[in-house]
Amino acid sequence: MGPNKSGGRARRSALALALGAVAVGSVAIVGCSGSVEGSPKPNAAQAADYQAEVTSSVVAVSSSKAAAAAAENAFAICEEMMIRSKDDVATFNVYIDANNNDASDVKAKGRAAVSSADEMASWLNDVAGDLPSELSGLFVDLADSLSETARVVERSHSASEINSITDTNNSIRDSIRSECGAL
């Protein structure tokens, strides 16, 4: 009874295992054999809608990147303007002090103020096109005002002329600072 009985048990276990595997396989085949309605071709309307969505998303991302780059560029120009403006104002104030004190080098200080104002005006005009419209307009306004300042300094002028043009320059500079701060 010993060796034969254990061999039979192993055969029965193997047979049961094989029958179980066949049963599971049959269920899987029967479950997957149902047909699905439809066409293997893409739905043209849905494909067009999807493509339009993707295109719109790509355009939005590109536009957003361009806007961020433009804002970063405008901010950098504003920073440069503040540095240049500080130097220009300092040069102009040296001229005003020399003029107010009847200094012997007032003409040299005047030439330096004219040169500084003209250089600043030229730079403002050069970069204005790289800025948003409101800021660009202010840069052009300041350039025009600085050019006028240079022409006033070159000729004989009254204190009220200088004070008036200085007030205009300062007002435009304040507007630029405000617009630059809003970036």
Image (cartoon, rainbow, N blue to C red):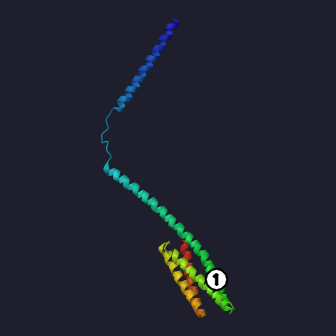
Q: Which of 115 and 21 is in front in this view?
A: 115
Give x and y (percent) for residue 132. 49, 72
Q: What element carries label 1?
A: helix
Q: Quadrant of residue 160?
A: bottom right
Residue bearing the label numbered 1: 91
Q: Is residue 175 visible?
A: no
How would you rate the neighbour count of disc 1 (Cα within 10 Å): few for under 14, some for 14-19, many for 20 or more? some
Give x and y (percent) for residue 80. 59, 73
Q: Is residue 49 visible?
A: yes
Q: Which of 114 and 166 is in front in this view?
A: 114
Q: In which quarter of the image is residue 99?
A: bottom right
Give x and y (percent) for residue 104. 69, 92
The residue drawn where x is 55% and y is 75% is 178
The residue drawn where x is 49% and y is 61% is 65
**Residue 156 drawn above or below residue 127:** below
Given the image, on which type of amino acid does mark 1 rest?
Thr
**Residue 5 drawn above or below residue 57:** above
The residue drawn where x is 57% and y is 80% is 119
